[in-house]
C-alpha cells in the first residue's frame, strides 16, 4: 500500500478535479485516453489516474484551468455522463455511496426533482422547438430515443428529426437494446420500426444479447434488420460459440448494398459453405475484413468484387489467398498474415498502394519475397521479432511507414539508427521490450531521432517488471533534437508497461495513471501510461 501511495503522490488540491460516473454500468472499461483528449481542451493536463472504473482524477498544471472545468459541473466521455467535483469536496459529495468490486453506486436521493404533471405548470410548454432540439441532441441512448419519441406528437416530430440524424452518424449496436429478457426483441422491433431506415452502420454480436425464452430469437432479429434497415451500408458481425443455429442469410436483401463488411470469427463456429455464400452475396463491397482463429477452415469465394479496394485477413494463414487475389487485382490496400503471397502480390496487384505484412518465418525470407513490390507501395511491418542481427535485411526494404517489433537482446541503439537511416518514410514505431537485458530504451530513442525526420509516433512497451524512468531532462533533450529538424513535424511518444497489453480486458481492481509532458508549441508530447498490477499494491 505504501508503494501505491508513493506512485500517486503529488496531487495538488487546487489543481485536481474528480470525475465520477453518474451510474455504474458494470463494465470493465478504461476511459483514460478518451478523458485525456476531452480534458486537454481546457488546459495543460499534468496527470490522469483512476482508482476504479467509475472515478477519474485529473490534475492540471494550472489551478485556473481546473477552476474552469469545475464550472461545467458535468461532462460526457465516450457517450457516458460524468459528474465533475472539486478535490476538497469529493468525499462530502459521495456520502451515502457504496462500493462493490471497484464500482461506485450512487445512493443519494436528495437531488431528485419531482415531476409536475399539471400541464399548465410544466416547463416543457415554455420551451420552443429549438430548445427541445438542443436538449435532444444531448441524448445518446438508443433506448431513450424510443422513449422520448413516444411521449407525445411534438416530441415524436422533433425526436425523429434529431435522433435519425444521430443514428445515421453512428454505428448501431444490438447490445445497446439489451434488457436481459423477452423484452429485448420487442424493444428491437420498436426501435427499428421508428429508426431502422436511418441505420447505415450496424454491429451485431448475439453473445451480448439475452432474449429470454423466445425461440429462434436471433433469426427473428435478423429478419427485422432485413425488413427495416434498407439503407444499411456498413456491417460488423461477431460470430461466437454455438452459433450454427443462426442463419445469417436472413439479411440477404441488405447484403448486396453493403460497402463495408467486417467478420470476427470464433474458432470453428460456423459451417464454412454458409460463410462463403454470405461473403459472396456482398457483391458491392469496398472494404472486406475477416478476422478468425488459426485453425479456422475458411474458404473465400473465388469471384470478382468489382469495387473492392481494401482487404484485410490478419491473424490467419490462408494458403489459397492467391486464388482470391487473382480475381481482385484492383485492390489498393492489403493486410495479410503471411509473407508467402508477397511475390504474387508484387507481380499482379498493380494498383496496390499500401501493404501490411504480419508474421512470417524469418526477416531474410520476407525481404526476398518483398523485393517484387512496386517501389511506390507503402509497407507496414507488424509482428516482427528481432534481436537486431537481422535488421540489415529490413533496411533493404523501402517505403516502410510503420514498424511493430518485439525486440530482444542484443538489440542496441545502433540497430535503431540503421533502421532510421534506411527508412526515410518511417512515421510510426512500436517497440515491445520484454527482455530485461535491454537497458536504457530512452537513450536508444534519443540516438535514432536525429535520423528519423518524418517519425510522428513512438510507442515503447516494457514487460517483465521493466520500468522506464523519464523526466524533464529527457524531455528537454528530445525537444532539442526536434528543433534541429528541417521540417515542422510534431512527435508523440508513449511509454507503457506490459500490463497495458491486455487493454480493455484489465480488471477494475487495477489502477492506472497517465503523466503528460508537453511544451507550449505542442512540438513534443510525451505520455507515460502505467497500469498497476494487483501484486504491486
Image (spheres, rainbow, N blue to C red):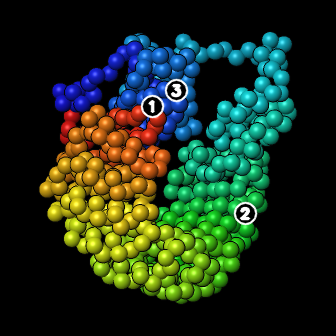
Q: Is residue 102 visible?
A: no
Q: Is residue 421 left or right of residue 18?
A: left
The vertical placement of 300 against 514, above or below, is below
**In the foreground, 497 or 295:** 497
The vertical placement of 475 against 461, above or below, is above
Q: Quadrant of residue 28?
A: top left
Q: Residue 127: x and y, percent?
A: 80, 20
Label 3 – label 2 distance at C-alpha: 45 Å
The vertical placement of 125 against 459, above or below, is above
* Residue that appears at 40% across and 23% down: 61
Mark earlier in primary sequence (3, 2): 3
Name the residue beneath numbered marker 1: 520
* Residue that appears at 55% across and 57% down: 205
The vertical placement of 315 against 430, above or below, is below
Q: Are marks 1 and 2 in contact (CB under 8 Å)?
A: no
Query: Dot 2: within a 10 Å radius of its alpha carbon, few (fewer than 14), some, or many (20 or more) residues?
Result: some
Nearer to us: label 1 or label 2: 1
Name the residue beneath numbered marker 3: 42
* Residue that appears at 56% across and 14% down: 111
Mark earlier in primary sequence (1, 2): 2
**In the foreground, 3 or 420:** 420
Q: Quadrant of residue 14?
A: top left
The secondary element bearing badge 3 is classed as loop
Query: Dot 1: within a 10 Å radius of its alpha carbon, few (fewer than 14), some, or many (20 or more) residues?
Result: few
Q: Are marks 3 and 2 in contact (CB under 8 Å)?
A: no
The secondary element bearing badge 1 is classed as loop
Query: Dot 3: within a 10 Å radius of its alpha carbon, few (fewer than 14), some, or many (20 or more) residues?
Result: some
Mark earlier in primary sequence (1, 3): 3
Name the residue beneath numbered marker 2: 226
The secondary element bearing badge 2 is classed as helix
For the N terminus, the image quarter is: top left
Amino acid at each position: 500500500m505504501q508503494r501505491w501511495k508513493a506512485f500517486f503522490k503529488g496531487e495538488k488540491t487546487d489543481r485536481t478535479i474528480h470525475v465520477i460516473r453518474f451510474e455504474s454500468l458494470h463494465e470493465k472499461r478504461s476511459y483514460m485516453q478518451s478523458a485525456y483528449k476531452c480534458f486537454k481542451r481546457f488546459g495543460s493536463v499534468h496527470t490522469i489516474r483512476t482508482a476504479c472504473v467509475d472515478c477519474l482524477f485529473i490534475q492540471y498544471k494550472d489551478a485556473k484551468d481546473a477552476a474552469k472545468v469545475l464550472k461545467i459541473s458535468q461532462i460526457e466521455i465516450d457517450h457516458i455522463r460524468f459528474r465533475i467535483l472539486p478535490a476538497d469536496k469529493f468525499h462530502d459529495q459521495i456520502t451515502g455511496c457504496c462500493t462493490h468490486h471497484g464500482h461506485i453506486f450512487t445512493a443519494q436521493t436528495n437531488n431528485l426533482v419531482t415531476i409536475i404533471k399539471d400541464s399548465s405548470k410544466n416547463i416543457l410548454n415554455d420551451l420552443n422547438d429549438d430548445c427541445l432540439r438542443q436538449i435532444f441532441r444531448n441524448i445518446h441512448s438508443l433506448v431513450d430515443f424510443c422513449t422520448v419519441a413516444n411521449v407525445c406528437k411534438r416530441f415524436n416530430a422533433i425526436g425523429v428529426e434529431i435522433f435519425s440524424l444521430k443514428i445515421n452518424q453512428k454505428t448501431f449496436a444490438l447490445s445497446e437494446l439489451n434488457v436481459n429478457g423477452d423484452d429485448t426483441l420487442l424493444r428491437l422491433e420498436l426501435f427499428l420500426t421508428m429508426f431502422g431506415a436511418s441505420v447505415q452502420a450496424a454491429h451485431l454480436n448475439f453473445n451480448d444479447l439475452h432474449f429470454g425464452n423466445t425461440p429462434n430469437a436471433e433469426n427473428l432479429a435478423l429478419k427485422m434488420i432485413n425488413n427495416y434497415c434498407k439503407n444499411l451500408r456498413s456491417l460488423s458481425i461477431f460470430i461466437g460459440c454455438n452459433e450454427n443455429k443462426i442463419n445469417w442469410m436472413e439479411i440477404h436483401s441488405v447484403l448486396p448494398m453493403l460497402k463495408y463488411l467486417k467478420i470476427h470469427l470464433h474458432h470453428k463456429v460456423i459451417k464454412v459453405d454458409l460463410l462463403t455464400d454470405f461473403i459472396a452475396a456482398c457483391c458491392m463491397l469496398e472494404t472486406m475484413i475477416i478476422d478468425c482463429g488459426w485453425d479456422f477452415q475458411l474458404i473465400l469465394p473465388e469471384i470478382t468484387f468489382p469495387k473492392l479496394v481494401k482487404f484485410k485477413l490478419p491473424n490467419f494463414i490462408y494458403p489459397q489467398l492467391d486464388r482470391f487475389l487473382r480475381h481482385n487485382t484492383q485492390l489498393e490496400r492489403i493486410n495479410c498474415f503471411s509473407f508467402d503471397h508477397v511475390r504474387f502480390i508484387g507481380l499482379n496487384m498493380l494498383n496496390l498502394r499500401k501493404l501490411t505484412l504480419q508474421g512470417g518465418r524469418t526477416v531474410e525470407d520476407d525481404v526476398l519475397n518483398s523485393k517484387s513490390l512496386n517501389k511506390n507501395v507503402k509497407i507496414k511491418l507488424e509482428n516482427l521479432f528481432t534481436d537486431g542481427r537481422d535488421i540489415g535485411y529490413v533496411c533493404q526494404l523501402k517505403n516502410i511507414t510503420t514498424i511493430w517489433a518485439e525486440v530482444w537482446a542484443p538489440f542496441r541503439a545502433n540497430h535503431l539508427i540503421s533502421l532510421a537511416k534506411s527508412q526515410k518514410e518511417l512515421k510510426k514505431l512500436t517497440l515491445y521490450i520484454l527482455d530485461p537485458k535491454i537497458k536504457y530504451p530512452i537513450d536508444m530513442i534519443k540516438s535514432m531521432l536525429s535520423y528519423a525526420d518524418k517519425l510522428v509516433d513512438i510507442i515503447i512497451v516494457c514487460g517483465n517488471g521493466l520500468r522506464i524512468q523519464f523526466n524533464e531532462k529527457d524531455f528537454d533533450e528530445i525537444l532539442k533534437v526536434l528543433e534541429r529538424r528541417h521540417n515542422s513535424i510534431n512527435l508523440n511518444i508513449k511509454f507503457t508497461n506490459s500490463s497495458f497489453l491486455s487493454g480493455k480486458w484489465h480488471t477494475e481492481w487495477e489502477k492506472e495513471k497517465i503523466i503528460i509532458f508537453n511544451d507550449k508549441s505542442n512540438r513534443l508530447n510525451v505520455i507515460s501510461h502505467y497500469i498497476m498490477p494487483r501484486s504491486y499494491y
